[in-house]
Image: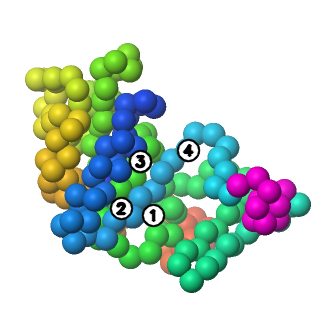
Amino acid sequence: MRVIGLAGWSGAGKTTLLVRLIPVLRARSLRVATLKHAHHAFDVDQPGKDSWRHREAGASEVIVSSRRRTVQIREVEEEARLPDLLRRLSPCDLVVVEGFKREAHPKLEVYRHANGRPPLHPDDPRIVAVASDHPFPEAGRPVVPLDAVETVADIVLARSEPLAALLERLDPHRLDGHRLEDHGAAD
């Protein structure tokens, strides 16, 4: 498994680019998983449906399963960390992380000039390229048009990081599902 992120401000077009990128990657015979960060409370089940009613009644965890799909909804006290979420994924060829812009994984910045927000790449050495509607001649990394999806796919594949290396870098004190300090080891 390899990992890369799409980072950018809200409204930059990350999701739009990602839903155009996934079919291109699939056409290259890759199995793709996505991991999306949400900044607010969100719901994946519909009000009135059984799973929603279970949670509303107070269940701390609900799993809905059919022969085609399984969804697990868990109420949490604190936000899960990126390394922990990556460990939960089933095997695939490529994981594209949408959001988590402050994490230290390789990222492709999605930048839209009309957003009026500053670019992220000048302050983030983990941004390996930029997909933008604005030129950045001093970017020091590839800058491609937002609609150059095939080129974005090439960059994503070339600059993604192996999962094991990323996890070691993001969470070096992890041992068999537990942090070393949980076992009394010194740093």
Question: Which of pointers 2 and 1 lies earlier in the amino acid sequence?
Answer: 1
Question: Which of pointers 1 and 3 lies earlier in the amino acid sequence?
Answer: 1
> Are the residues tagged 2 and 1 within 8 Å (C-beta)?
yes
Residue 149 on image: x %, y % = 20, 46
Q: CA distance from mark 2 to mark 1?
A: 8 Å
Asked whether 153 falls inside the magenta stretch, the response is no
In the rendered structure, the answer to whether residue 53 lies left or right of residue 7 reads right
Amino acid type at mark 1:
Leu
Question: Which of pointers 4 and 3 lies earlier in the amino acid sequence?
Answer: 4
Q: Is residue 135 above or below residue 14?
A: above
Q: Which residues are magenta?
A: 46-56
| Crowding near the residue tagged with mark 4, few <14, some 14–19, many ≥20 C-alpha atoms within 10 Å | few
Residue 101 falls in which quadrant of the image? Answer: top left
Residue 137 on image: x %, y % = 11, 23
Q: Which residue matches tag 3?
A: 98
Amino acid type at mark 3:
Glu
| Crowding near the residue tagged with mark 1, few <14, some 14–19, many ≥20 C-alpha atoms within 10 Å | some
Residue 96 or residue 184, whichever sits in front: 96
Q: Which residue matches tag 2?
A: 95
Question: Which of pointers 4 and 1 lies earlier in the amino acid sequence?
Answer: 4
Amino acid type at mark 2:
Val
Q: CA distance from mark 1 to mark 3?
A: 12 Å
Q: Which residue matches tag 4?
A: 38
